[in-house]
Structures are given as C-alpha cells and as structure tokens.
Amino acid sequence: MAEITEAGYQTVRDFIEANWIYHSLRDDEDAEILRLSTADARVSWTHAVGAQVLELTTVISGADTDVTTPQIFAGSEIYNVATEGEPLADETFEAFTINTTSDELTVKHRIEIPQVV
C-alpha cells in the first residue's frame, strides 16, 4: 500500500480550505443556531499557511442581528453546503451562553490532516 506524501496531504488541506467553507454553530441540544460561510466577516481560516492543523474561526457577538439572547452555544460543525447536507467535521465544546449584546464567543474548529494518534 502506498503512503500519501506531504504534497498529497497539502493538496487535501487546500481542497478542504477551498470547499469546506460553512461553519455551523449548535446549541446544547445539537440544533443549528447559525451556519455562516467564509464570505461572512465573522468567519475565517486562521491557521498558518501549510499548517497540518486547519483552523476555522468564527466570532459571534450578542450584538449580531442573527443572534437572539439568551443563546447557548455548545458545538461546531463544518459543511461544504449552505443548507442541509452532512457534517464533514464536528466537535463539541463547553457550553457558553450569550446573554447580552456585549457577550462574545470565539469558536476555533480545528481539523488535523493527517490526524496524528
């Protein structure tokens, strides 16, 4: 069986960065609150160029018009489609409640390629 080279892994990382562009934020019952794309100023890839760990970061505020307070955030999923679809990566985090317009949440969803175990 052949090994994937570093250039091969970089090609996979480049594909993910270009196509897995929708960040879904979930509540404590796993219901979607928001799904934002990298076209939204609140969402961006924040890892270093060529990094093994890709990092999609979303910053949400209670002042955002699409956030109703109080709102509990507890999970993150990455998609390649704007609606519906299957999550391509998911993770949970300690629940955080946005109660006021001054509250802010930063979610960093990390994808390691290749995953080192």
Image (cartoon, rainbow, N blue to C red):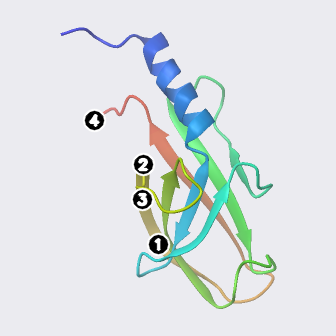
Judging from the image, what secondary structure is the residue with disc 2 in? loop
Judging from the image, what secondary structure is the residue with disc 4 in? loop
Specify which label sits upstream in the sequence, 4 or 3: 3
Horizontal arrangement in the rendering, residue 70 relative to residue 10 (left or right): right
**Mark 4 residue type:** Val
Q: Quadrant of residue 35?
A: bottom right
**Mark 3 residue type:** Glu
Closest to the observer: 58 or 102? Answer: 58
**Mark 2 residue type:** Leu
Specify which label sits upstream in the sequence, 2 or 1: 2
Specify which label sits upstream in the sequence, 4 or 1: 1
Residue found farthest to the left: 1
Residue at the disc numbered 2? 88
Specify which label sits upstream in the sequence, 4 or 2: 2
**Mark 1 residue type:** Glu
Q: Quadrant of residue 59?
A: bottom right
For the residue carrying disc 1, how many other residues have a C-alpha within 10 Å: few (<14), some (14-19), or many (20+)? few
